[in-house]
Amino acid sequence: MSDSTIDLRGVMCPINFVKTKLKLEAMNPGEILEVILDSGDPIQNVPKSIKEEGHKIVEVKKEGDFFRLKVQRS
């Protein structure tokens, strides 16, 4: 269960992280954001950057050629 979802398939780094960060900033602490990311650089870079911002990665799930990432707003 997530409070909000953002689909960033086809969005290149670092724009996908910037969009994720802006979406998280608009949410309340403790809320869960589901981020849909491509494999490769996006799934490698975005979770790392989110953790550096102090947010918590709750779940990473591979679905076909993309990933669903659940992030808890700090």
Image (cartoon, rainbow, N blue to C red):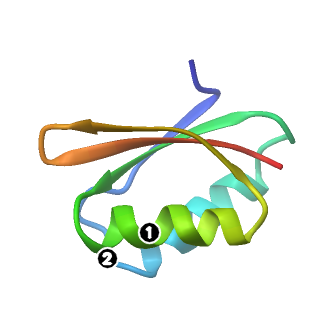
**Identity of the residue drawn at 59% across and 26% down:** 2
Q: Residues within 10 Å of mark 1 (few under 14, many from 20)?
A: many
Question: Does 31 appear above or below 47?
Answer: above
Q: Quadrant of the N terminus?
A: top right
Residue 41: which numbered mark, if any?
A: none
Outermost residue toward the bottom in this view: 14
Residue 23, given in percent of the width and then of the height, sits at: 64, 55
**Identity of the residue drawn at 86% across and 41% down:** 29
Is 63 on the left-hand or right-hand side of 28?
left
Looking at the picture, which amino acid does disc 2 mark?
Met
Residue 31, given in percent of the width and then of the height, sits at: 75, 33
For the residue pair 12 and 41, the one nearer the viewer reads as: 41
**Identity of the residue drawn at 83% across and 49% down:** 74
Is 21 on the left-hand or right-hand side of 69?
right
Residue 27, given in percent of the width and then of the height, sits at: 77, 44
Q: Residues within 10 Å of mark 2 (few under 14, many from 20)?
A: few
Q: Which residue is mark 1?
A: 16
Find the distance from the CA under tag 2 to the CA under tag 1.
6 Å
Is 36 on the left-hand or right-hand side of 56?
left
Tell me the SS state at disc 2: loop
Tell me the SS state at disc 1: helix
Q: Which residue is mark 2?
A: 12
**Identity of the residue drawn at 30% across and 74% down:** 41
Looking at the picture, which amino acid does disc 1 mark?
Asn
Residue 50, given in percent of the width and then of the height, sits at: 63, 64
Tags 2 and 1 touching, CB below 8 Å: yes
Question: Does 16 appear above or below 73?
Answer: below
